Image: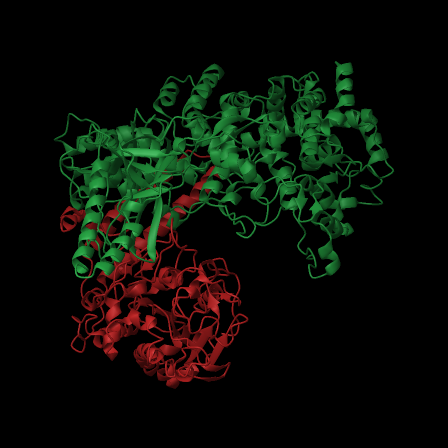
Chain colours: A green, B red
Amino acid sequence: MRATVAAILFILPSLCLNAQNGPAFEAAKAIGLERSSYRKPATAARISPDAKPEADLETFRTKIEPLLRESCYQCHGEEKQKGKFRVDTLDPNLLSGGDQSWWLEVIDVISNGEMPPVDDDVELADEGRAEIIDWLSNEIHVASQVRRSEGGHSSFRRMTRYEYNYALQDLLGLQFDFARDLPPETESEDGFQNSSEMLQMSASQFSQYREIARQALRKSTVRGEQPKPIHFEISMTEMTERATRNFESQKKKIEDKFKDDPEKLAKGLEKLSNSNSRNVSLNDVHLINSKAVAISPPRSGYGGKEIRWDPVEEKPQPPTETENQLIIPAGKEQIFDFGDFLPDSGTVLVRFRGSRGSVEEGSYPNLRIRFGFQPSNNSKTSFQVGGKTIAIKAAPNDPQFFEFQVPLGEVSRNPYRGNGVLGRRPNPSEYLIFENMTMAKASPSNQIKIDYVEVTAPYFSQWPPESHKRIFIESEKSDDEKATAREVLSAFMARAWRRPVLDSEIDRKVKLFVKLRPSCEDFEDAMIEVLAGVLSSPQFLYLAQSDETADKLTEHELATRLSMFLWCSVPDSELLDLTESGELSDPKVLSQQTERMLADPKAKRFSEQFTRQWLGMQLLDFLNVDKKFFNQFDADLRNSMKGEPIAFFHELLQENGSVLNFLHADYAMLNERMAVHYGIPDVHGNEFQRVVLKPESRRGGLLTQAGLLAMNSDGKDSHPLKRGIWLLENILHDPPPPPPPAVPEIDLTDPDILKLTLKDRMEDHRNDPACMSCHAKIDPWGIAFENFDAVGRWRDEIGKDAVDANSVLFNQQKLEGMEGLKLFLLENRQDQFARSMVHKLASYALGRPISFADRADLEQITADLRKHDDRLATLITLIVTSEIFVSK
Amino acid sequence: MNTRLSSLDRRKFIRGVGGFALALPAFETFSGVAKAKATSAGKKRLACFYMPDGVPMPRKDDPAFQDWSWFPHGSGRDFKLTKCLGPLESLRDDLTIVGGLSNPAVRNIHGHSNADQFLTSANTGANGDYKNGVSIDQVFAEKSGEHTRFASLVLSTDGGTGSPRGAQTLSYNKNGRPIPAEHRPKRIFDTLFVKSNDDAARQLAMSESALDDLMEDARSLQRTLSKSDQERLDEYLQSVRDTELRVEKAKQWIDIPFPKVDADRLTLDVTPEDPLNYLRTMYELIYLAFKTDSTRSVTYQLGRENGVGASDYLARAIGFNLTHQLTHQTKQPDGWKNLGSYCRFLNEEFGRFASRLKATPEIDGTGNMLDNTLLYFGSASSAFHTSRNYPLILTGGKNMGFKHGQYLKYGQGNEDNQADAGVSTDKGWRTEAEHQELPIADLYVTMLQRLGVETETFAGSSKTLSEI
């Protein structure tokens, strides 16, 4: 084995000189694994049940201290204290002393070769280094286990904004954005929003919870008879007839006006013909019939021209013929105007029958819809609705029905509807825009063909709606309001508070109902007020842990922690049933449930929330790219950039792949927009799909993902410092110290400084010894990213100069660009990365800061992870079945 | 489309906006402290006014330049008002004219779309999705509203909210949603001085019971927690207590009688069809609202952009048919003079209102009302629909530290206001600005601080303008 590794090491340098090469990375992964300290047999547990744990001061005195004196005391001792740090005065007793956090620093810098610095005259031989690390790991392990029993941070906290949102969605069965008006959360040091230390409560936020609960319950419930829906029936045959009628009537007007002036008549008719339907461009939206005659659809307008569709009462029948069709080429859109007839609330169902233009290989069309209105010429707005884009792959001879649903009460509406005159300003009309959002060059294969559109509002799949029936359950006692209230409350409270509810608790709510009833219009009204209270109660808002059990979570608390972790929401009935029978805490059951939950669609929320917070992606939300540098940065690209890391995480989770893929992988999850951005051909559609990467693509893993690179730039150019810090904080969990208060600015008016490249400028800037100590550890990492510009594209030149992405780490290790960076990490930092993943996932899972007391458990999880090929889903299970997860 | 009205949920009217808050469209109430005696010690007031579509900005070589430029000639303390602002000469030492400010995010967007962001300085964009932020008056009202029956009064000639990028209100709440404006003098008078919201007492009583119950929930949860967790839950308990206090205060206002105001001198059924009297009545109501301390924060959008709505009739007061058209006809004979005369008319009425405040002593005899009231008058449109170099006037509020008596010009490269002068086509707002302007949010931070709001920032700015 060693010989093979040596052989690979020999061949490696020549392979690396070319573009990123699969075998090189695979070899690096193997090397790194060989070097893992987790491969050594686990140290025998030093805590036996009977013996009292003790610090190993003997080994320290005889072996460790001499090593430290030789290699560390010169700079960190009595004479000198570099970095204001002394090793000689550290208390070697980690169990009872107070220097644990310093010893953690020591083990980190010795493990990754940062100390002693390579260019100084002290040395630390490999065996000595290993001895120190061994002793320290043991001591830390024992000390952390001792600390556990002393208690650490509590994870008692309120639900975060996004958890509250999902909890309401799951409880009520409505997919609305309930938390829209709540203030954003603050991130903890680790970047997580669900950290117990950061989640606070104020009076105004409390009032918002009450109001949101009230509104949400009103939206979930109904009264009386099912409202009669109105329908809009849009057939392209009718649209063609309208366009023809329009044209004929305009022609007649001109003929009448100039009937005595043949010259003006001819001119007028020519102008009409040029500007109007007869001269349609096939590259634009057009109507076409079976004889391939094309005309323009009627143009929509806010003032004067009424092209709206009028509602009908009878449910329309789709026509059997498809003589006339609407063609929407790639990148174009068509407006359907509905006047002001759409109701104030309820769902509007938008159905259409369509296909793509032809079934060639290659790009197919994607449709999304926007809702909008334009009351006057400078006042217009439109925004995406329907929650998805639809890939239209149906063949032209076999058109299919597709549909969207839009909750009308949840979107911005035209304030003039019902108050304006259609066709005049302010125009009260509202419209839907059908957009063919395919990025590829227009061709028949990515055209959308539609022959029929049908709109129904309000649409209910059942009456009363399911959300209503969940709350107002069937009751036999429907005459006795108080008894019905009790039934409704018992069912609702148990689900909302995620535990069995005491009779006394229900009694109190029934009493409130009785008190409020006289002031309310009817039973439902009063019920909604009381249920809003149930959803504003701390029993719902907070994830509590009772003090009654010693240090294990109760079954219910465990169920809540598990569902918050994997679904960002309240437990479902299957989980709650298991808690009734007390089975959940059985590790086998926990494993099974973890598997079930990760396979559930709701696990996408976990992928999204964890990835966003882990990688600090809120920076992407605020990214402003300079238009002069790159003018194609639009909402679609931003959303795709945000989606890529999340899709990648989710894919890795579903296939239970190795977390090392985050450092480099031979595939990526791309949609058409991202593929175009990267210059990767033949990826179609708006959904993220697995794409095998060729080495020339220069992509693979998180470090080359455009969104992550763009958010660590300044809108015009790369920002090596931000990228270096991001790598250290988010990926390696080795955050640099914060900058000192008075950092002098670079004098950009100095012509000499302007001449330097960015890399040289940084070196010049940090040459100040005060700055050197920290920046020597940060900048080199960031320089390795220099081949990627401010929107993550690969570049070989910056202006006229070639990119110089080579740097040297503190220990003289060279990093040659992104490839060199990845190889270095894979060969030397696998353990660090594994520990980082465990730390980040555990912080998120527990909802509290990680403390020294947790260290032993996390080390154990890391060791197990490394023994299981570093698999991601396995890691989740390891965390869920670990001591720390089932304890307070 | 009357089916709409009948299908409206009646309960919406009963319940109003927000839990226990008294709610009629124009008046947001939070709570009020019942003060036995009205004192004016440290009292501060704010009123914001907006005029749309633009102001006269003729070129230097145009004969109308001398008399009809909106901005004064000169600078600093040495400035000469033109005929546009002439009516304000008697208030010279109580006012500051400001130029060279705008919202950087929307400088390349048509002025007609930009009334929305005048008091919010948010990036409201040109099309597509729309998002706005909180307006300065609401930031101020959150604090000042603790002392008055109504936290703020939101008015406009056209009423309602308008639509995204076509605002008919100046005020936006914390979530960037428009606060509907009232436009009917009778309704304004009734709400301020006559009728109370009957439903308020019922809602407040319900709130009290609901809060009681939540307190019980919290206490029973607390009993099961560890000591340190109990401390964390204290935040929730404190929040409930604070809300209970607010309900208490709101209840007190129900028992306090309305101030007695004589309606005989007012013509409350006037509409913009009689623009002169309409405008005077609106100003009178604002004056009365301040005088009775019913509120300390008012916004009044004199007209919405683009001439859509009743506000377009205001120019009839001086014999022109439609107001917005005046900004399009500046190249015609007397074009600048006509537009300038309209500005002059608006400034006359505004000046009359400000002078009235100046002539009214504070109740406790500590000076006049104008010294405690900051009046902010301006537009997001200056030269023909370009949204730069906003024409702005600050009046009053001397007790808050405004120096006044000056014409301050900020930015660089447009000191003579010629950058877009004489423009009468879309070429104006479509061209990139060659000169520099300061973000108007700097002014807003300054204003908020002088108004006693403890803040270092507003809409992304953390700078102030010390000269003001």
In which image quadrant can residue A62 be found? Answer: top right
Q: Is residue B333 left or right of residue A798?
A: left
Residue placed furthest toward the left: A479
Residue closest to the far right: A121
What x and y, as percent, mark residue A836? Answer: 61, 31
Q: Is residue B67 left or right of residue A272?
A: right
- As rendered, which of A151 and B384 lies closer to the eye? B384
Give above or below for A817 relative to B434: above
- Residue at the front extreme, as displayed: A262
Vertical comparison of B147 with A394: above or below: below
Residue A861 placement (x, y as % from top left):
59, 23
Please state if A804 lies on the left or on the right of A256 as rendered.
right
x%, y% of residue A626? 54, 51
Q: Quadrant of residue B285?
A: bottom left
Q: Residue B279, relative to residue B106: is it above or below?
A: below
Toward which corner of the image does residue B289 lie, by quadrant? Answer: bottom left
**B293 sits to left or right of A698:** left
Identify the residue shown where x is 59% and y is 30%.
A701
Place of residue A574 in the rendered image (x, y in percent of width and height, measured from the top left): 36, 20
Q: Residue at x 18, y 78 (%)?
A: B265
- The answer to whether residue A195 of the structure is visible from this angle is no
> Which of the pair A861/A308 is nearer the observer?
A308
Between A111 and A439, the one lying in front of the other is: A439
